[in-house]
Image (cartoon, rainbow, N blue to C red):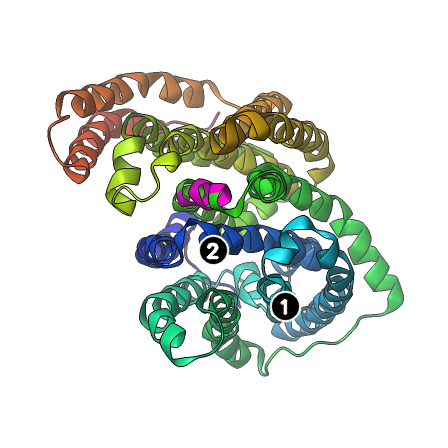
Amino acid sequence: MRGNRGVLQNLSILTAGQIAAQLLNVWALVFLAGHLGAHWFGVIQIGVAFMAYALIIAEWGMATLGVREISVLEDPRAVFRYACSQTGMMLLQAIVVLGLGLVVLPRLPFYREDSLVFLFYLLTVLPQAFFQSWIATGIERMTWVAVNKTANSLLYAVFILALLPALGNWSSLAVHRWVPLMLIASMALGNLAVAVPLSRRLGSFVRPSLPAWREMRRRWRATAAIGANAIVLRIILNVDLLMLGILASPAVAGSYAAASRVLFFLVVAVDVLWAALLPRLSRLAVSDPTGFRTAFNTYFGVLATALAPLALGGVLLGGDIVAFLYRGQFPAAERPFQLLAVAYPLLGLSSYLGNSLLAMGRQHRYTTPLLIAAAVAILGTAVRIPAQGATGAAGAMLLAHGILLALVAANQRHLFSAGCGRLLLFLILPLGALAGVVQVTGDLPVLARIALGGGIYLALAAHPVRLFLHRKRP
């Protein structure tokens, strides 16, 4: 029933397609920003931020719970029954959120910019209810998950790059209104990449049904902390765009989004990582606590090794990267890019640590750090946006993400090993070398400086990482 690949193989499968998809998505993002201009690009990105909250509330931890509970089922018929009932609950929740959204949306200040855009984004809760990648994740069919995630991203990017200009000329519908419709189409079509092979494995297509009321209550109790944590984490992730939509103009939000959306691939990368780790770590947490601690440190060390140079490189080269991507069209995005290049890696590490609590069934211990960081994000953006605009929003998010990492790391301090600490210390030299290379190659094109700095970092970090991976269990 379950795949035989190891975690690292799962990660490689998930990562290969995502690299190509995310690169194409960055291209599509840059094209969209240039095609729409700062104002309408800002409206679209505010819509995306609003959509994210709707999707999280509609899903409310059901997929995460499903992965955890399916991971221990061996009988395909039991998996099928569980998947159908979980899909039915997610559809019910999506319908409720759709109704609530129709009431709430008209009362938000950015709604008047273009009501149809925000209504289209609200409709995404319906195709999300039928997503089945969580089922494939639970039975560790990571190839299907990779194809699904890649298909979603590639279809959306292709629609934007190939169809958007033509639709603007051929259709009476304003070009920016096509963007959320293309997203809905890519979500629906991309889901077929996992639904079809999954139907062969389970004997039939998953169709929504509802479990008994007692079972529904049990699942809702189990997802209460997961859903609450997810919505608070989303505040920490993108309340900045919503606050910019409320307190600033769409053009300011558009410039900010030009920086933040390019860096969003870091969040996607951590989500991909966790999709591969959750089933295995959930079983280790129950059956092998020592093995769980080893895996916890291994993946944290690898993740920190990967994110550290991205943060440093973003600070050193942020202005050049923004100028290269947008050809000078969004100069106001340069400083936010530098700040967010540090903020998002901090959030990625926090997300990994918080999700490890989920694998142990202790997700309630993630709630307090999330609430504190969310309060900092809301208050910080509310205070700094009127004074500093996009830069103030980025600074507030950096502070919130740093506080979250400090709190959740303190909460998990008993799991960290000395070997993980030594690895982080050994990364100081490779990071220093990266900074030196970037500084002395200032006359070269930005892509060449990235390649040279990244190359010297990889060369110097390889040995301490190798020693760390081959250490004995803590």
Q: Nearer the viewer, residue 473 or 396?
A: 396
Q: Where is residue 371 in the image (x, y as percent from the top left)?
A: 70, 32
The answer to whether residue 323 is left or right of residue 83 is left
Q: Position of residue 69 (x, y in %)?
A: 67, 57
Magenta part of the protein: which range? 252-258
Residue found 68% across the figure and 34% down from its top: 366
Which label was assigned to residue 84?
none
**Image quadrant in which you'd find residue 424:** top left
Main secondary-structure element of the magenta-colored stretch: helix
**Image quadrant in which you'd find residue 351:** top right
**256 is within the stretch colored magenta:** yes
Above or below for 295 versus 472: below
Bin the neighbour count of mark 2 within 10 Å (Cα to Cα): few under 14, some 14-19, many 20 and up.
Answer: many
Above or below for 279 versus 137: above
Q: Residue furthest right?
A: 214
Residue found 57% across the figure and 50% down from its top: 49
Mark in front: 1 vs 2: 2
Residue found 67% across the figure and 45% down from its top: 231
Residue underneath mark 2:
40
Q: Where is residue 199 in the image (x, y as percent from the top left)?
A: 54, 79
Residue 288 appears in view: no
The answer to whether residue 412 is left or right of residue 21 is right
Which label was assigned to residue 123?
1
Q: What element carries label 2?
A: helix
Q: Nearer the viewer, residue 84 or 162?
A: 162
Could you give the CA–CA distance between mark 1 and mark 2, rounded to whole angstroms? 20 Å
Name the amino acid, label 1. Leu
Q: Where is residue 38 in the image (x, y as percent from the top left)?
A: 42, 49
Residue 269 appears in view: yes
Disc nearer the start of the sequence (1/2) = 2
Q: What element carries label 1?
A: loop
